[in-house]
Image: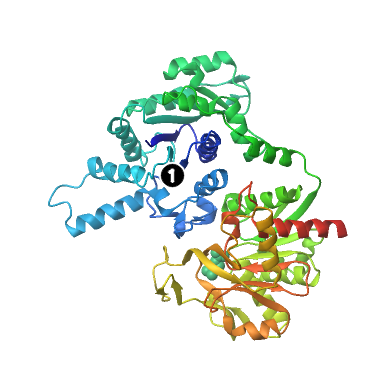
Amino acid sequence: MTRYIFITGGVVSSLGKGLASAALGALLQARGYSVRLRKLDPYLNVDPGTMSPTQHGEVYVTDDGAETDLDLGHYERFTGVASRQSDNVTTGRIYQQILAKERRGDYLGRTVQVIPHVTDAIKEFVLNEPEGTDFILCEIGGTVGDIESLPFLEAIRQLGNDLPRGQTAYVHATLVPYIAAAGELKTKPTQHSVKELRSIGIQPDVLLCRSDREIPPHEQRKIALFCNVRESSVIQALDCRSIYEVPLAYHEEGFDREVLDVFGIENPPPADLTRWREIHGRIESPEGTVKIAIVGKYTDLQDAYKSLGEALVHGGLANQVKVELQWIESETFEQPDAVQRLEGVDGILVPGGFGERGAEGKIAAATFARTKNVPYFGICFGMQMAVIEAARNLAGLSGASSTEFGACDDPVVGLMTEWTEGNVLQTRGLDDDKGGTMRLGQYACRLIQGSKVDKVYANGAVNGAADGAVQGHTISERHRHRYEVNINYREALEAVGMRFSGLSPDGALPEIVELEDHPWFIGVQFHPELKSKPFEPHPLFASFIAAAVDQMRLV
Ligand code: GLN
């Protein structure tokens, strides 16, 4: 029997609902239950793939090539369960399906309406592929009271009646703010938000009350009374120093126990939180700090590089060090000598990105890392920039660039118009739609025996590296890009010490490059950060941070 937990949010956005959902999933898992997490996003975009990272944060890519909300990254990092396309839906996608059906004539002349057609489609999404999972957790994006989220709330309300009694639970996350002038915590916003939820027919079972300080028992009693929930179901959710402390803190407050109680599970198996305690312990007692510069374009909003920041933390966990991040806008390096700002950092990372703005700054950062022997990790765009740098400054191809920025003499990075997905040839043209047309999702990569990355992955496997990373000498990683390093420049680049150490199985697409004569200089066409987990740090991040630790000792 699959049980469903619906998580809504009230009062304000950015309450940490995604993390709370991920933490609840992890806690249920710690008690031996199987879980799957889903996100329902009320906006009209079909997926976040076309949305600006500075507005919406990172686009999280799944193995099956879906471009999804960044909360799915939290889900996967906290539970280890790989997310899929079928775990994230938006209003746009729902309408796209319904309108396609309408055009096909599937509705046989009936009027197509929000209730029941849109709500039915939402319910279908919630109930799809339960596969015997014990708990499916569905987070509803947005805040209760938004016009956009009404059909989603209506659908989950209906599910409470559609499913047998005792198979659904409603968790509502709210904010209990502290008003400094009055010196008081205020429960009114929570009361109003629950009132709103109840007016559309949903009575929350458990309230997760976010607060920056302890909520005294009498205030908790007041919330219970006015919101019609049990006193024990008012869970105080205080700010934590690290996100990996959240499962431990919420468990202490009885969050998972209360949710299980809603289902009538009174004596659940105890939670084994050993691995969370261990991670928490490591975070609390680092043996040093390494400084990593992230040279990117969306540095104002760190959510734009969510998984990257987390994967670096995981790399730190593997080496028992704290990783201090310096976010640097790459355009600043386009001023003469500005690159000297990188003096004193222990590692430089150039992440994924799109478009020409700031590209020369990233290339300058790669030159700095190469010539000063500072560890360099180029991810996707960061790999492409490292290749342009080597082509220009080592191979003497002064006109080397990427066709993403326009025509050039030496297109060492070019538009990928053909590749194979399974046995199917994919083709793309310049004028194709932007949405969902990149090379997306999991692809195999063959590591060249004896290369540095080959050793990195092999060592990672010994230490319990990211899942599925090593299969003999073939790894599998997630992609999201339109351009590709041009294999025709392999010889010219290898002759000057940039080795093509990972290739697509057919040998046509360069997946990894590395500098032979450098302590740690690796560029990867894929996004390893998407598969890193706190209890299974990705081998590339573990190795990069290890190199940064060596660098720190040198300085
Ligand atoms: N803009 C580059 C491409 O499309 C890199 C994309 C990325 O870094 N994710 O290939």
Compared with 291, 388 (above or below) is below
The residue located at (14%, 48%) in the rendering is 110
Query: Is there any visible trace of residue 328 in the rendered image?
Result: no
Compared with 276, 510 (above or below) is below
State which quarter of the image contains the C terminus.
Answer: bottom right
Q: Which kind of residue does numbered mark 1 sit on?
A: Arg
Residue 214 at what x, y percent from top left? 62, 22
Residue 123 at what x, y percent from top left? 31, 42
Query: Where is residue 168, by image quadrant?
Result: top left
Disc 1: residue Cβ within 8 A of ligand 1's nearest atom? no
The residue located at (45%, 43%) in the rendering is 36
Q: How is the image coloured?
A: rainbow
Query: Is there any visible trace of residue 514 in the rendered image?
Result: yes
- Residue 169 in the figure: left or right of residue 345: left
Picture quarter with ligand 1: bottom right
Residue 244 at what x, y percent from top left? 63, 40
Q: Residues within 10 Å of mark 1 (few under 14, many from 20)?
A: many
The residue located at (49%, 76%) in the rendering is 416
Residue 34 at what x, y percent from top left? 47, 40
Query: Where is residue 215, by image quadrant?
Result: top right
In this view of the protein, which residue sits in the foreground, 170 or 339?
170
Residue at the disc numbered 1: 38
In this view of the protein, which residue sits in the foreground, 548 or 202?
548
- Number of numbered callouts drawn: 1
In this view of the protein, which residue sits in the foreground, 192 or 429?
429
- Residue 423 in the figure: left or right of residue 21: left
- Residue 92 in the figure: left or right of residue 529: left
Q: Secondary structure at mark 1?
A: strand
State which quarter of the image contains the N terminus.
Answer: top left
